[in-house]
Image (cartoon, rainbow, N blue to C red):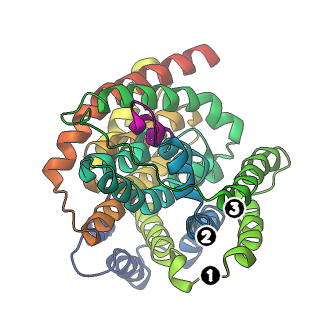
């Protein structure tokens, strides 16, 4: 049975990247097969699904929230505000980092990528180069808060982690990586090409309506954590505020496919994890042990995608909570190197292809390595130092 469980994990992960079918179909089939052949019991599968309820509730509510903010004109108006001066790319970099951190990396990639392509074309910039900003920051800026990444939400629920825990253990590393990432990005070829001084219009109504909603969200996430209120509750409140303002919310705005994918991979990973022999790789709590855990998690993310890598890693940790931070660092940061390392990368490429821009795997890795190597190195040093200082 172990061979069947591990084989179905491989099939499920490969199915995420299968062309011409939705990414959740093959993993869902693998999970159903496991249940049929007795590779996992109904109770264990149900426990896995229940452990993902709160994170997925937030995902299902946060993406429509970001879409409604976009339809309100909020993101384009903020981009117009920051898109000026000697180097407007810096303002757009900050906007992408803030959106990723405060809302969600998937929403940031889906909404900001077409916006940045539009800005680039109107200002005479390279659309591909500017469009790289959201996907690079999906890796570098998605670790500081639980809400920033589905991986964070899953780990937070699994290990009972708080907002303050993320800010303390991964916030400094995320900030350092974002700053170093900008310095590396700004040195890319053509990054200093001439910028046409064209000012996009700023919709004051969108700013007046959208800014309080975002502020309420941030305050709600912070205060709610202290009282044990889940993040999805505040996302729901924000959705209810925005719905009468936009009067435009569609079934297609909800990422049901991503939710089905997460549940399916969770069931398959739970079944296969005991047979992968990773427990010893996540043992210990010394500096070298943490370095090893981050490396294993990163290689796992870049090999089989960061979501199954996290789920397998969490099952392999046992009671060793000290290794959860290097595990999260690895699965969150490593996707900057390969396009398939995170679902955000696949969403980003699909968005660009609809805009007539095709970024291949090699091109992505070329930019990802130039920006990611110094950024990830800086972030990893900060994670290890933070753990040493906090004990």
Give the residue number, with chain letter if any, for mark 1.
248
Relative to 31, residue 137 above or below = above
Give the residue number, with chain letter if any, for mark 2.
68
**Upstream in the sequence, badge 1 or badge 2?**
2
- Crowding at dot 1, Cα within 10 Å, few <14 / some 14-19 / many 20+, comes out as few
- Nearest to the observer: residue 292 or residue 387: 387
- Nearest to the observer: residue 313 or residue 43: 313
Q: Main secondary structure of the magenta part?
A: helix
| Quadrant in the rendering for residue 347 | bottom left
- For the C terminus, give its image quadrant: top right
Furthest toward the right, the residue is 227
**Upstream in the sequence, badge 3 or badge 1?**
3
Mark 1 and mark 2 in contact? Answer it, CB < 8 Å: yes
Mark 3 and mark 2 in contact? Answer it, CB < 8 Å: no
Residue 86, magenta (yes or no): yes
Q: Residue 326: x and y, percent?
A: 46, 33
Residue range of the region highlighted in magenta in the rendering = 84-94
Query: In the drawing, what numbered circle is on residue 205?
Result: 3
Element at badge 2?
A: helix
């Amino acid at each position: 049975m172990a061979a069947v469980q591990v084989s179905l994990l491989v099939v499920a992960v490969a199915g995420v990247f299968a062309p011409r079918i939705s990414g959740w179909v093959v993993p869902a089939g693998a999970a159903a097969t496991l249940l049929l052949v007795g590779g996992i019991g109904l109770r264990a599968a149900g426990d896995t699904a229940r452990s993902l309820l709160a994170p997925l509730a937030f995902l299902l509510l946060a993406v429509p929230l970001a879409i409604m903010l976009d339809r309100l004109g909020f993101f384009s108006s903020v981009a117009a505000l920051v898109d000026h001066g000697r180097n407007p790319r810096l303002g757009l970099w900050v906007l992408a980092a803030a959106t990723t951190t405060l809302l969600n990396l998937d929403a940031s990639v889906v909404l900001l990528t077409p916006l940045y392509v539009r800005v680039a074309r109107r200002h005479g910039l390279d659309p591909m180069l500017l469009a790289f900003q959201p996907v690079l920051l999906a890796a570098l800026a998605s670790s500081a808060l639980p809400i920033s990444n589905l991986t964070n939400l899953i780990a937070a629920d699994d290990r009972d982690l708080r907002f303050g825990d993320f800010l303390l253990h991964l916030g400094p590393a995320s900030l350092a990586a974002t700053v170093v990432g900008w310095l590396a990005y700004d040195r890319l070829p053509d990054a200093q090409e001439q910028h046409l001084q064209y000012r996009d219009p700023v919709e004051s109504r969108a700013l007046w309506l959208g800014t309080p909603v975002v502020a309420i969200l941030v305050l709600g996430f912070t205060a709610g954590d202290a009282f044990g209120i889940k993040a999805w509750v505040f996302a729901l409140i924000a959705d209810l505020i925005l719905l009468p303002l936009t009067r435009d919310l569609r079934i297609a705005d909800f990422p049901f496919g991503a939710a089905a994918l997460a549940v399916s991979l969770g069931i398959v990973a739970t079944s296969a994890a005991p047979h992968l022999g990773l427990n010893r790789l996540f043992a210990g709590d010394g500096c070298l042990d943490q370095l090893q855990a981050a490396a294993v998690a990163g290689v796992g993310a870049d090999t089989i995608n960061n979501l199954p890598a996290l789920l397998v890693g969490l099952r392999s940790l046992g009671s060793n909570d000290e290794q959860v931070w290097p595990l999260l660092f690895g699965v969150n940061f490593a996707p900057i190197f390969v396009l398939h390392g995170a679902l955000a990368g696949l969403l980003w490429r699909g968005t660009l292809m609809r805009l007539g821009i095709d970024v291949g795997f090699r091109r992505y890795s070329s930019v990802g390595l130039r920006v990611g190597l110094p950024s990830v190195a800086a972030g990893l040093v900060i994670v290890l130092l933070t753990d040493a200082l906090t004990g």
